[in-house]
Image: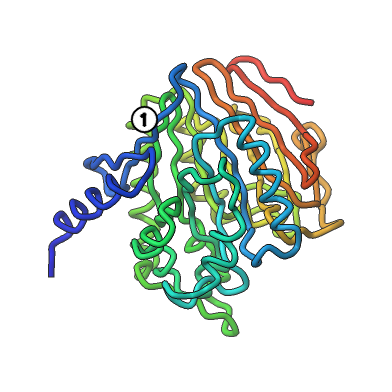
Amino acid sequence: MPNKSMAMIKFSAFHLILLMSATVVMVSADLQRFQHTVKPDGSVSFLVVGDWGRRGLYNQSNVAYQMGNVGEKMNVDFIVSTGDNFYDSGLIDEDDPAFYDSFTNVYTAASLQKQWYSVLGNHDYRGNALAQLSQVLTQRDNKWLCISSFVLNAGNVDLLFVDTTPFQDKYFHEKDQEYDWRGVLPREEYLATLLKDVDVALKASSAKWKIVVGHHTIFSAGVHGNTEELVDKLLPILQENEVNLYINGHDHCLQHISSSNSQLQFITSGAGSKAWRGDINPWNLDEMKFYYDGQGFLAAEITENEVYLAFYDIYGNILHKWSTSGNTRSAS
């Protein structure tokens, strides 16, 4: 059996060939690090969609269509998926036709044939989680990349993708649910290592803008609400390392919550297909900047001096805009 270092070298060479604009960089930390080429002016733009994989149903195709339009106008560099990539129970294996039916055959616009960077959601863990992490899928559609946790550098932006499903206690207690915990157990060791790796990666980052991407909410007024395990274990690390944005899915909505005691903004983009109309809980209006219970997606453009976010619905309307230069913020 090849050792870990040899496997990582083979993985790197593989992705140097297949990843369109991304380069794998091996670092001392356990988290793999990718570099994505940015525009000549140093800016980077990308779309974020979550909770989408329903074979084009529940307005998934309409969301994909508008993503294509916005992606073309912005000349996006890549797309981020916040998880729950294939409903209801992930993929059966690497040959599951759902991969084509819910991904390849839905996101067909030319502007979306860029690298997709994805994390797993809880529904993905209900199937064969390792299938989504397999290089076989990347061979079949080279825009697909899904890794449990990793770092993506794009110019002056570092995006850190975190596997949040194993944090949730309830998934380990539900007797009527089956989850694919291969690679996760023993759980406490997995989480301790992951939290350490996240902290190390953020401390090592010299990027001006730091973004963390996970499937589960930290704070949310949606049906799932706050994820207390992440509030207790992950949030302090984000705050200590001055992360700018935490972007998630899980709640099937579009949402922007501002932090009252730090620069950290909580952004939900989990409206890639089936939405939950009317599922909103009371929240402090000073912190709740925007909530939409329909389908849509997020667009981000980041320059050296500014982060600009816009939420879109299935008609291409901008529902909410927000920007920051680090010292000043504006929303509309």
Residue sitting at x 23%, y 42%: 26
Residue in the image at 58% along x and 67% along y: 101
User: Which corner quadrant of the image does residue 40 belong to?
Assistant: top left
Using the image, determine if residue 255 lies above or below residue 227: above
Q: Residue at x 63, y 21 (%)?
A: 324
Q: From the viewer's perspective, is 153 left or right of 14?
A: right
Colour scheme of the picture: rainbow
- x and y percent of residue 94 in the render? 42, 72
Residue 185: percent from the left, percent from the top?
36, 70
Whether residue 28 is situated above or below residue 191 in the rendered picture: above
Question: What quarter of the picture does the N terminus occupy?
Answer: bottom left
Which of the image's four quarters has the C terminus? top right
**Secondary element at image label 1:** loop
Q: Which residue carries the number 1 mark? A: 205
Name the foreground residue: 76 vs 179: 76
Residue appearing at x 42%, y 53% in the figure: 145
Residue 11 location (% of width, % of height): 25, 54
- Tell whether 169 sits left or right of 162: right
Closer-to-camera residue (95/280) = 95
Tag 1: amino acid: Ser
Give how far across and how far down residue 218 sits, in percent. Answer: 61, 48
In terms of depth relative to the viewer, which is nearer, 97 or 322? 97
